[in-house]
Image: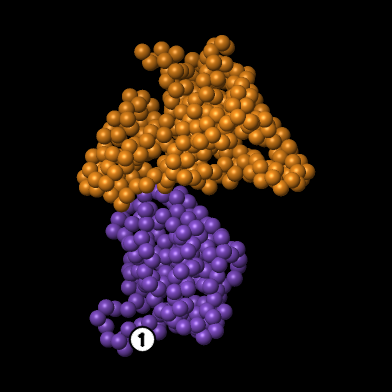
Chain colours: A purple, B orange
Amino acid sequence: MSHPLTPVLIVAVKLLCGAHARWVGCAPEERQRVYVANHGSHLDTVVLWAALPPALRARTRPVAAADYWSRGFRRWLATRIFRAVLIPRGVPGASPEAREASARAAVESTAAALDEGSSLILFPEGTRNPGADIAPFKPGIWHLARMRPGLELVPVWLDNLKRVLPKGKFAPVPFLASATFGAPVVLGDGEERGPFLDRLRTAVVELGRR
Amino acid sequence: MTTRFDPELVVVFGGLLALLVTATVVGATLRRRVTAAGARATIENAWQRIVAWWGMCAVFAAVTAVGPLASTALFALLSFLALREFVTLTPTRLADHMTLVWCFFVILPLHYVFLAVGWYGMFAIFIPVYAFLFVPIRAAIAGDVEHFLERTAKIQWGLMVAVYCISHAPALLMLELPGGAGEGPKLLLWLVIVVQLSDVFQYLAGKTLGRHPVAPSVSPGKTWEGLVIGGLAATGVGAGLGFLTPYPPIVVAGMALLLVFLGFAGGLTMSAIKRDAGVKDWGSSLAGHGGVLDRIDSLCFSAPILFHLTRWMLGDGA
């Protein structure tokens, strides 16, 4: 069930940046999907979420890094409002075994959320990227697509949010921002990791040029 | 004296309701009858506009009924949305971030507070003096010199059009008009009706009879036929609604004509800025109309002039 404060948050987000949805590659249908977006601002999650129609929003959960979202207000926001799927992030300097274990746990908890029927919001760059380009995608999304064949990955381009709240700033500036939804990408039979991640990333980048 | 049950306001809002019903009936009929591919797009756009007009009229009627503070709050919100559209199309840089935070969350609200408490002197100079000097100072502190003057000027112009100019519409409520506090809301209503009807009439006359564009490189949709026929029709309505204003009968038609001209000039100037930025509309928040600025651009230029002319005629402006 959605939190009673959710509508307040949605109105605040729309007042701040419009959060206009452009469905260019698919229709907003009530089916299980993973929304795969570029990541440049703390507002990305909430804006993509606000851009979805209410019925879709109610079943869509963002996937977020547990180390960042596990304390205080952020924790309340992540667990109560977004019902985020919190996953471990690779710790720099950890042993290869430890990294592998944490990557497996991340993919498994994401797959478990899919099995409950939720749609997901995922940022495969792994972290906010301040540059103009999109960073290479992390391989977790490929593992997830292999575990759940036929899963629809909808590429999403989030526009202008780096202007609203750039990395390193605390106060936002109201700019109109939009989320552009492209045609779903599905993992091909035996498609290898590298080509698949490139294809998915290109789909997101192409939306940004439209 | 309460504005709520003022018989003149009831008559005018009743007239607006009748106009909306007529437009809806005509629009619905055209939607069913017209099938030609070329005309379809125009009819669909007109239909979206009519639907949006219902919402805009309802909101305006509601705030008028609640009182001057509600009207002022509505225009503050419109200023916020308009400034948001303006800066989105302005190529700002990361160094402008804090300057813009100040513009949206300090300068804009303070300006409307000065208006709401009726501090005329501060309302008149706060943006053109204090804010206009603050903007370049804050940008210089941020340290990025690339296109410095250009960036500063664009942010100042955004404040000027979206905040300062628009705020002169609700500023009419602060004038001490003969007849008491109930007269301000009527003058505001008259301004909005004349300017917006002028837009509608010019659009209709331009779509049906328009041949010769006024400034083809700026806005191909604005034609001489639309301007003259639509403008004169709006002037006629403005003169007919003269009972809403404090002006003598001879003056009221001239004022309406001036508003029509300034509304047109505002729309044309804002179109030139859009053209320069390479877009057709300021945004997409009002289906069929474009953005908020697309709807209120004609108010930006007419409101300050009407405010100051009226103030001068009342003898306060000497």
Residue lying farthest to the right in this orientation: B33
- Left or right of B48? Residue B273 is left
Say which quarter of the image contains residue A130.
Answer: bottom left
Q: Residue at x 60, y 67 (%)?
A: A30
Q: Which residue is mark 1?
A: A101
Say which quarter of the image contains residue B31.
Answer: top right
Could you tell me residue B249's position as x and y percent?
57, 12
Q: Residue at x 55, y 20 (%)?
A: B256
Say which quarter of the image contains residue B22.
Answer: top right
Q: Quadrant of the C terminus of chain B?
A: top left
Could you tell me residue B243's position as x and y percent?
59, 17
Q: Residues within 10 Å of mark 1 (few under 14, many from 20)?
A: few
- Left or right of A84? Residue A166 is left
Q: Residue at x 52, y 24 (%)?
A: B261
Q: Secondary structure at mark 1?
A: helix
Q: Residue at x 53, y 47 (%)?
A: B284
**Above or below, comparing residue B164 to residue A196 in the picture:** above
Q: Nearer the viewer, residue B11 or B181?
A: B11
